């Protein structure tokens, strides 16, 4: 043992001492400089080792035996020595290149009969122990000739010297592994938390040939906390209750060590009305680099995604395998229900994380439907009158539909049985169309976001709503079908669907629907005729449940061209004396305000129950009649109408009889009116001419008119019928009497 380093002149080196054989007691050598040279000679094999000490702290250092407590490399990064121990050290808050775990004497050989413990800690998980460009040399097998001693490769079967790594603060924690041998350490060791303990043991009869180890300590930089509850090491439950609606959460593959046979599960559970979406922003598949137990077959590690809340082989969405699968990044896996189950399994185990490295993100989407979803469609819904007679509807709440490369088309079908004479009343309460690449000039044909309402009973006159429609029309628009079915289509252009509507909290549109025109209202469309009537109720209310719901009847009365129409309400019996609760309203097509209304109130007079609609206003050839009642089971009325032909007047106010129509069409001029009716309508038992029988003007059912038109004809007909009838009866009586006489037996027969 000499004082001085390699650069010190030989003449200036001081021999501190020399010994051989076994040392029975501690020998102390004091150097005068901060360098010590130790020459070790065995069978003419010489090894020179230099030790350096920091002279700034203390000029003289003690060297115990052949090795000193402070090595040449990194004296300030080797942790704090545990008092009263030789080689137990504590490392706290380790960062990259700040903590070095070394065997005593490193890079020189370590002594025999050591039992060292290193307590390692990082501020963040996962703590990582790795060798960087250094050799691992821990063996301890004793050889007769050190020069001929075979090199043992790295192994976990260690009968001599070894290190043990524990996943925790002490030896009570799980044992990650035992290591020995010589060579390049092939992998890192990553703990599952912030602490790892390394135990180093050398045999009492080692050869003094192994240089030990030099580990760096840090932490795996990709650690992210998952928002969920964990059971055990890696069984997780993620719930939408812990994720803000519209936000995403994440979970990662195992980044730390795990034993063979490890199984991890991730249950992602949403609310009853939600679906789960999961995708991988980052996914890599690599060979298993650090298996704890080698496996030669396929799929040493697997990741399986189930469309279920548990393992179900019939509902596997995707399976990844470490030996042949390709990573699938940024692909959406969407559950059909409210849960998704992901399972990872490893036959091999690993010292430094999974061979299937993934970063998974998941979120939840409201999948509530207003109506009944139509199978094998993207977003179609069915609304049936017997399921729910009225309610709300709107654009899909599940905005995943807009994350697509194709145009989105959603159909909303409203249907009622034909025998119920139903109509559908749609009201669009709001629309929120966003940016379109094209302007909406022709709503039906332009490729823009729009709503199209199709009425199969309206002969192709569809209604279309887009952003330009809103500029010239007011909301909410109401549409009434002509029959028991109606379809609304929502069209969204794929070019901006995702940008505009994906994860948008504002619906594209919202509306309400109601199946109106109860079966007790009767047919919805009444063909044109010279006269007719609407009798309410058409059927007894109890037959179709008319007592239980408010009634809104809408009749479309068709009218011939160039005809006036006289409407008259007879037999009016309303139970509610409130026009806001029970009323008849007469509209012209395309007008929002009624032409006149009829309701039961204290000052109602007969004149208010009749009105004439002129041909010049009936340009669409129809009259729309509404009846609304909150007491439908207690209402009765009869609405009668007659088609009139307006006759021009002379300058003196008299009717221009020369303008009368051909015979049969307009043969009777209504008294006091510049109008005529068909001849067949005169004296048919129904008043068809406007006018009040109590006034001066007479109508077509006035007794004097009917007598003058039908009296003489009636007498001759009656006389003829009576004579003919009497003759027939007399003949029949004679025949019966004669037949009876022939069959009577002689009185002497018996």
Image (cartoon, rainbow, N blue to C red):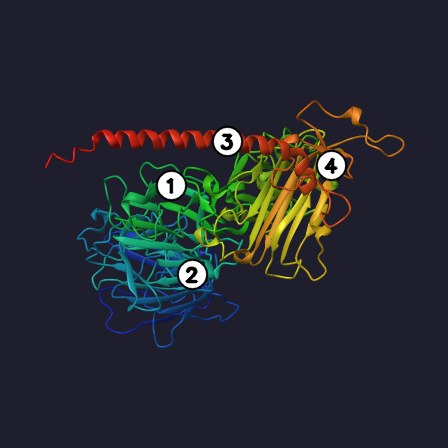
Q: Give the foreground label among 2 and 3.
A: 3
Q: Which residue is mark 2?
A: 228
Q: Residues within 10 Å of mark 2 (few under 14, many from 20)?
A: some
Q: Which residue is mark 1?
A: 285
Q: Give the foreground label among 2 and 4.
A: 4
Q: Secondary structure at mark 4?
A: loop
> Where is 721 relative to 239, above or below?
above
Q: CA distance from mark 2 to mark 3?
A: 99 Å
Q: Residues within 10 Å of mark 3 (few under 14, many from 20)?
A: few
Q: Give the foreground label among 4 and 1.
A: 4
Q: Which residue is mark 3?
A: 721
Comes first in the chain, label 3 or label 1: 1
Most foreground residue, 151 or 301 = 301
Most foreground residue, 675 or 420 = 675
Residue 98: give x, y in percent of width and height.
Answer: 48, 60
Q: Does 683 sit left or right of 134 as displayed?
A: right
Marks 4 and 1: CB-CB under 8 Å? no
Q: CA distance from mark 2 to mark 4?
A: 86 Å
Q: Does 4 sit left or right of 712 as displayed?
A: left
Comes first in the chain, label 4 or label 1: 1
For residue 670, which numbered disc appears in the image?
4
Q: Quadrant of residue 642?
A: top right
Q: Secondary structure at mark 1?
A: strand
Q: CA distance from mark 4 to mark 3?
A: 32 Å
Most foreground residue, 505 or 453 = 453
């Amino acid at each position: 043992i000499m004082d001085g380093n390699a650069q010190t002149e030989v003449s200036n080196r001081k021999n501190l001492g020399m010994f051989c054989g076994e040392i029975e007691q501690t020998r102390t050598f004091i150097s005068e400089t901060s360098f010590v040279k130790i020459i070790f000679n065995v069978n003419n094999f010489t090894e020179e080792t230099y030790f350096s000490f920091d002279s700034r702290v203390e000029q003289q250092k003690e060297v115990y035996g052949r090795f000193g407590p402070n090595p040449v490399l990194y004296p300030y990064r080797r942790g704090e020595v545990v008092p009263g121990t030789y080689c137990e050290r504590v490392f706290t808050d380790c960062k990259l290149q700040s903590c070095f775990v070394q065997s005593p004497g490193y890079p020189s050989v370590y002594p025999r009969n050591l039992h060292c413990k290193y307590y390692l800690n990082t501020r963040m998980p996962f703590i990582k122990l790795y060798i960087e460009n250094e050799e691992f040399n821990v063996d301890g097998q004793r050889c007769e000739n050190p020069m001929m001693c075979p090199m043992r490769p790295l192994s976990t079967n260690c009968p001599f010297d070894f290190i043990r790594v524990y996943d925790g603060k002490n030896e009570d924690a799980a044992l990650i592994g035992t290591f020995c041998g010589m060579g390049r350490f092939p992998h890192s060791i990553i703990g599952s938390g912030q602490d790892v303990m390394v135990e180093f043991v050398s045999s009492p009869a080692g050869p003094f040939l192994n240089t030990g180890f030099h580990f760096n300590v840090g932490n795996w930089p990709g650690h992210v906390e998952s928002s969920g509850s964990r059971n055990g090491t890696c069984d997780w439950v993620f719930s939408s209750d812990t994720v803000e609606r519209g936000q995403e959460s994440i979970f990662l593959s195992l980044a730390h060590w795990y034993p063979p046979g490890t199984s991890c599960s991730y249950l992602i559970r949403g609310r009853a009305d939600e679906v789960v979406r999961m995708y991988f922003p980052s996914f890599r598949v690599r060979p298993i680099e650090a298996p704890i137990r080698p496996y030669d077959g396929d799929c040493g590690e697997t990741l399986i995604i189930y469309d279920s809340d548990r393992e179900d082989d019939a509902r596997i969405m995707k399976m990844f395998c470490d030996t042949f699968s390709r990573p699938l990044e940024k692909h959406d896996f969407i559950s059909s229900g409210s849960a998704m189950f992901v399972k990872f399994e490893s036959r091999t185990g690993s010292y430094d994380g999974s061979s299937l490295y993934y970063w998974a993100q998941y979120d939840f989407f409201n999948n509530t439907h207003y109506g009944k979803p139509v199978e094998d469609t993207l977003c179609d819904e069915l609304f049936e009158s017997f399921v729910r007679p009225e309610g709300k509807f709107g654009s899909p709440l599940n905005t995943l539909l807009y994350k697509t490369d194709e145009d989105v088309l959603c159909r909303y079908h409203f249907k009622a049985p034909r025998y119920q004479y139903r109509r559908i009343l749609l009201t669009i309460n709001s629309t929120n169309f966003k940016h379109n690449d094209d302007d909406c000039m022709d709503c039906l044909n332009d490729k823009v976001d729009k709503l199209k309402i199709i009425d199969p009973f309206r002969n192709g006159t569809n209604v279309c709503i887009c952003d330009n429609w809103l500029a010239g029309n007011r909301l909410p628009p109401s549409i009434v079908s002509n029959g028991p079915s109606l379809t609304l289509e929502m069209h969204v252009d794929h070019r901006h669907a995702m940008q505009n509507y994906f994860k948008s909290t504002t619906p594209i549109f919202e509306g309400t629907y109601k199946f109106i025109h109860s079966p007790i209202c009767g047919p919805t469309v009444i063909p044109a005729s010279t006269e007719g009537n609407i009798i309410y109720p058409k059927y007894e209310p109890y037959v179709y449940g008319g007592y239980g719901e408010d009634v809104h009847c809408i009749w479309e009365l068709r009218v011939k061209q160039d005809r006036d129409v006289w409407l008259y309400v007879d037999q009016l019996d309303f139970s509610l004396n409130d026009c806001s609760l029970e009323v008849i309203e007469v509209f012209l097509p395309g007008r929002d305000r009624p032409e006149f209304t009829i309701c039961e109130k204290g000052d109602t007079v007969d004149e208010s129950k009749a009105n004439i609609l002129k041909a010049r206003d009936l340009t669409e050839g129809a009259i729309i009649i509404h009846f609304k009642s909150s007491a439908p089971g207690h209402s009765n009325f009869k609405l009668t109408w007659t088609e009139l032909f307006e006759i021009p007047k002379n300058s003196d106010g008299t009717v221009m009889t020369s303008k009368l129509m051909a015979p049969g069409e307009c043969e009777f001029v209504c008294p006091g009116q510049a109008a005529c009716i068909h001849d067949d309508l005169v004296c048919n038992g129904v008043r068809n001419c406007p006018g009040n029988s109590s006034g001066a003007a007479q109508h077509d059912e006035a007794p004097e008119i009917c007598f003058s038109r039908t009296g003489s004809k009636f007498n001759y007909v009656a006389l003829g019928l009576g004579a003919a009838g009497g003759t027939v009866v007399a003949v029949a009586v004679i025949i019966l009497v004669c037949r009876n006489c022939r069959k009577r037996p002689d009185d002497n027969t018996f």
